[in-house]
Amino acid sequence: MSNSLSHPEDPDFHSSIQENLKQLSAQLGSPLDELSITEIYQDACDLLSHISPSPLTLARVAGTLLVYRVQKTELEESQWFSTQVKQCLDEEEVEELIESIHRTDSL
């Protein structure tokens, strides 16, 4: 079974996203260990497995999951986000979903 999220043109992007997640968790005041970062990254990959997202979209989904974990967001909200991502038909819909979350939070 091949991983639809593999990008042979940039083999380091997986580790780069994970390193950025680690730095973000530290900046948010809740540094996470390697195992937690790997879990968040894998969750993002799993949520996006039905499409072929760009590294940026993958990073944004992983970052959203990280923020939910670090801020101890209610489980229902995190599950809602995951369900919505799984229902997106393409990368553009995923990006619109993430943007809509940010707009809602700023109101």
Image (tube, rainbow, N blue to C red):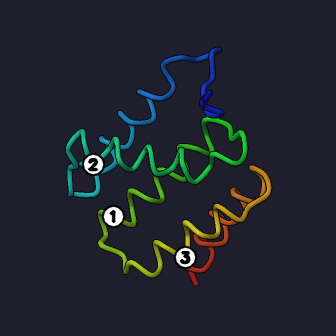
Q: Residue at left 57%, top 54%? A: 47
Whether residues under marks 2 and 1 lie with C-beta atoms below 8 angstroms apart, the answer is yes
Q: Residues within 10 Å of mark 1 (few under 14, many from 20)?
A: some
Q: Is residue 65 left or right of residue 25?
A: right
Say which quarter of the image contains residue 83: bottom right
Tag shown at residue 69:
1
Q: Which residue is mark 2?
A: 36
Q: Earlier in the sequence, mark 2 or mark 3?
A: 2
Q: Is residue 92 left or right of residue 9?
A: right
Tag shown at residue 44:
none
Q: Residue at left 67%, top 37%? A: 54
Of the residues shown, which amino acid type is indicated by label 1? Arg
| Residue 67 pos. (x, y %) | 39, 62
Viewer-nearest of discs 3 and 1: 3
Q: Quadrant of the N terminus?
A: top right
Gap in Å between the C-alphas at discs 2 and 3? Answer: 20 Å
Q: Residue at left 30%, top 72%? A: 72
Compared to 11, does 47 lie above or below? below
Of the residues shown, which amino acid type is indicated by label 2? Ser
Q: Quadrant of the C terminus?
A: bottom right
Q: Residue at left 54%, top 48%? A: 46
Residue at disc 2, secondary structure: helix
Q: Earlier in the sequence, mark 2 or mark 1?
A: 2
Residue at disc 1, secondary structure: helix
Residue at disc 3, secondary structure: helix
Gap in Å between the C-alphas at discs 3 and 1? Answer: 14 Å
Of the residues shown, which amino acid type is indicated by label 3? Trp
Q: Which residue is mark 3?
A: 80
